[in-house]
Amino acid sequence: MACVDAIDGPAYILDRTWRARCWNAKASLLFAGWLDADGEKNLLRYIFLRPEARTLILDWTSRARRVVAEFRAAVTAYSDDPDIRRLVEELRIGSPDFERCWDTQGVLAREGGERAFNHPAMGLLHYQQVSLSLAGWPDYRLTMLLTKPTVRNR
């Protein structure tokens, strides 16, 4: 999907199991250990099973709780999907934090907002997250991290 490469900031597309299907070079640089690594690129596995995610994502605990609630809301219509059931069971077994978040049964719509990262090479980074559904692709979601404008006092 060429549209992802045309985006100036980090951008990626997730499928219904939150596996990255497409991403640009800036997303690969930002999400070291997820989008730049070999193998499967599931966002939930990265957040809950990779230790570098806890360092990269500022306020990891509250972000992780919100991500699980957003995932639960996104997959409610697919509760019988075997891929989703397998993913949830794997994460419950592999991460006590995921299991705690999942068991609270929180449900939240995905929304944008401020996102902050403590990147090992680039330092503290702030973005405004925008997530969009893709017309004609109901199971896919585009996420863009746009550089947060600097507020200037006059």
Image (cartoon, grey):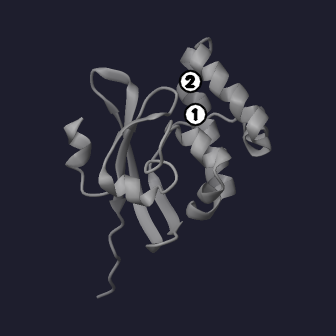
Task: Judge left or right: residue 112 versus residue 72.
Answer: left
Looking at the picture, which amino acid does disc 2 mark? Val
Q: Secondary structure at mark 2?
A: helix
According to the image, label 1 marks what residue? Answer: 71
Give residue 150's position: percent from left, percent from top: 34, 75
Give residue 25's position: percent from left, percent from top: 31, 54
Name the one closer to the observer, 124 or 52. Answer: 52
Q: Secondary structure at mark 1?
A: helix
Q: Disc 1 to disc 2, how far (Cα)?
A: 6 Å
Relative height, residue 8 to residue 134 (above, below) = below
| Residue at 79% across, 40% down | 100
According to the image, label 2 marks what residue? Answer: 75
Looking at the picture, which amino acid does disc 1 mark? Phe
**Residue 22 picture quarter:** top left
| Residue at 27% across, 20% down | 136
Relative height, residue 131 to residue 139 (above, below) = below
Relative height, residue 41 to residue 25 (above, below) = above
Give residue 42's position: percent from left, percent from top: 53, 37
